[in-house]
Amino acid sequence: MSKETKYTEDNIRSLDWKEHIRMRPGMYIGKLGDGSSADDGIYILLKEVLDNSIDEYVMGAGKTIEIAIQGDKVTVRDYGRGIPLGKVVDVVSKMNTGGKYDSRAFKKSVGLNGVGTKAVNALSTFFRVESTRDGKAASAEFEKGNLTNQDTLDETSRRRGTKVSFIPDETIFKHFKYRTEYVAKMLKNYVYLNPGLTIIFNGEKYFSENGLRDLLSDNINEDDRLYDIIHLKGDDIEIAITHSKTQYSEEYHSFVNGQNTTQGGTHQAAFREAVVKTIREFYGKNYEASDIRKSIVSAISIKVTEPVFESQTKTKLGSTEMGGGLPTVRTFINDFIKNKLDNFLHKNTDVAESIQRKILQAERERKDLSGIRKLAKERAKKASLHNKKLRDCRVHLTDSKKDRNLESTLFITEGDSASGSITKSRDVNTQAVFSLRGKPLNCYNMTKKIVYENEEFNLLQAALNIEESLEDLRYNNIVIATDADVDGMHIRLLLITFFLQFFPEVIKEGHLYILQTPLFRVRNKKETIYCYSEQERRDAIQKLTGKPEITRFKGLGEISPDEFVHFIGDDIRLDPVMLDKDKSIEELLSFYMGKNTPQRQEFIIDNLKVELDTVEEEL
């Protein structure tokens, strides 16, 4: 019989605020990550500090926010009212302390629980807060949440406001790097939602005059819009709507009190429902909801009194009530859209006709594809039962409609050997594997029909669950894992083409990545170093004494599962697939995947020359 483990008073521990945050950071900022994903922890740290500055602007204090990111140090300076000087230390180091519990001061704030800046403080190796108001100033510095310095000034000529600087702790955020593209997108969303606010990031100015209209203008090329953007505003609500000429699925940008709710929630569900209901009533036709919403690109922002989110990172709204004496979220949004959108369509008959033509076109396509879809779904269901292509993870084995786990990942691999290595190395709780057979089809310029007729695409679509809306996406991260050779690069390109052609919002919303695996292993008897580039290989050879053994990896299947576990675990390196904002999807696909072979050859030769010149300079 096994010996019973003792359980006494000595087993009971009480952690102070900073110890608990550092021990369980995921409870406060979601996933950690290295900055390769837009929802990685280092961006949440920035957001938590920035939210306080935004709330100052919303309350009418301070029209400019300055942000600087230099290396690993982040600085945010606003010109709001400034933290009350006697509370500078408390508001960043004492849990459940803040001004936002007083709804008179912050009626519709983003951060209501007094946790945000405390989490930033505890998870930073350096944290400094400085407040200026009434001609006086106070500052405090911390290290991992511990106060290291405190100062006050009785007189200062500095402008009022708050300045926060911090350096994330690299022992928690390993090998982290801020990506300008993700920061820029976050800041753009802030100015879209706060017209009149100026944000200056590393010298670049962000400003919006037209709110959500500007958001859609920046996210969908003018040539791809079926009609001019519908922009409607009311008290505590703003919406923008258009339809894409080429995109197949739905795309939503939703916000609550200035927070980007990337996983939707009650407001986004109500918005989708209200658009369908209003369109049906306007035309007097009981159109299918999927036909009405097909190709829609839209944005909604609402303001709720004391909103309830489903996590500390506030990516999904759980509130059903608007608060402040208003009706439910669902009723409020439905009444607004029923009134404003209906009026708009009556006044703009050209837009109304465009929308109806789009609905009828979607209806015809759906009916034409109905037989193929039925067969495709049956094949996909049969294949999933036999588990031939997809090795799922546990978060999805019981409920395919379960909310996306931020860590849930699908690796798309080539061949059985590569999928075998990843399958044996993966975390079965959050990591799934989809195995390709050979090279996928080049689907540029093809219709959605090919997705159902092509077995690989049909099964991949079924695995991701993205036929109609990104809301149902089953994995937060989709990772292309191919060999580091010409064939692997080609497969990677063909898969990216598939997503750009049929599901561009997967890329727009930051869900698609490329897995970086080491090209070389350099080792001696004492140490092994994995190298992802020629430069890293040279550095490793210099570091290791003697004549180290050098192995060149070509295929993922060549890497043993015991080694592979590092490359898809804590040390995973992911490169996000991002769209060039200056080029349309059609331009990208036609150049790289079209029939303009001579142009591509010239492009390759020119860029090869640049690459060779760079290598020669390094040598």
Image (spheres, rainbow, N blue to C red):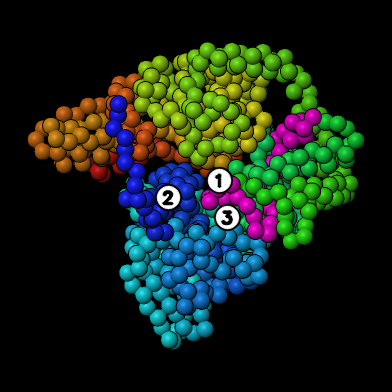
Of 471 and 428, the residue lying toward us: 428
Q: Residue furthest left?
A: 546
Above-or-below relation of 548 to 558 = below
Give the magenta part as a residue range. 288-315
Q: Residues within 10 Å of mark 1 (few under 14, many from 20)?
A: few
Quadrant showing the C terminus: top left
In the image, what residue occupies the spot 29% across and 36% down?
A: 533
Q: Which disc is residue 188 wearing?
A: 3
Can residue 303 be seen?
no
Between the residue at mark 1 and the residue at mark 3, the CA separation in whole angstroms equals 13 Å
Of 199 and 348, the residue lying toward us: 199
Between the residue at mark 2 and the residue at mark 3, the CA separation in whole angstroms equals 27 Å
Quadrant showing the N terminus: top left
Measured from the top left, where is residue 459 in percent x and y?
Answer: 57, 19
Q: Amino acid at mark 2?
A: Pro
Which tag, 2 or 3, sits closer to the chain's start?
Answer: 2
Of 381 and 147, the residue lying toward us: 147
In the image, what residue occupies the spot 64% across and 55% down?
A: 307
Q: Which disc is residue 25 wearing?
A: 2
